Amino acid sequence: MRDLDLGNGIVVPAHLLRAATSRAGGPGGQNVNKVETRVTIEADVDALPLDDAQKQRVREALAGRISRAGVLRVTSQAERSQIANRDRALARMEELLRDALEERTPRKATRVPKVQKRKRLEEKKKRGETKRLRGRISS
């Protein structure tokens, strides 16, 4: 297994990652019935070489993938070979951690200009009038 490069000089050593294999589901005949091709990569969030703020950011961003014990899990079963699935799972974990660590600038709240509001309401009135004119003519 390889180290994960998260950018900004942060590298997760391979010894902090655990890989487990199991049989993948779905079609595939003999291969799927006999070979353990699904790969699950696990990493303990507390053991990652990150500071407390970064660990908290990872926990918030990836809350759905982290167990109560604080273990981040990524699974891959898309490929027919175990090696390809392991590489895919490692790449996915690297991508998820990179995205979680990326600092996002907060959005500035802005107001909708009065002209835009007026224009939108005029369009709605025009559209409503068009629909009203399509109705029955009362005599």
Image (cartoon, rainbow, N blue to C red):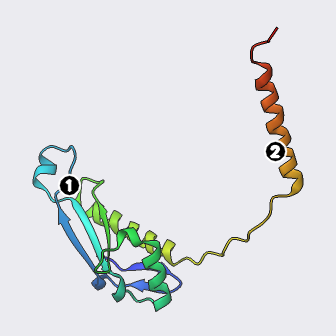
- Identify the residue at horizontal 74%, vertical 17% (top origin): 135
What residue does disc 1 label? 24
**Would you place residue 1 above or below residue 110 in this image?**
below
Amino acid residing under circle 2: Arg
Q: Where's residue 56, x and y in %?
A: 46, 83
Give the Cα distance between marks 1 and 2. 53 Å
Residue 90, quarter of the rendered image = bottom left
For residue 120, which numbered disc appears in the image?
2
Question: Label 1 neighbourhood size at 10 Å, few (<14), some (14-19), many (20+)?
Answer: many
Earlier along the polypeptide chain: callout 1 or callout 2? 1
Residue 51 appears in the rendering: no
Q: Where's residue 137, x and y in %?
A: 79, 12
Residue 84, quarter of the rendered image = bottom left
Residue 36, quarter of the rendered image = bottom left
Q: Where's residue 93, x and y in %?
A: 38, 70
Q: Is 27 displayed left or right of 76 in the figure?
A: left
**Would you place residue 90 above or below residue 59 in this image?**
above
**Would you place residue 36 above or below residue 54 in this image?**
above
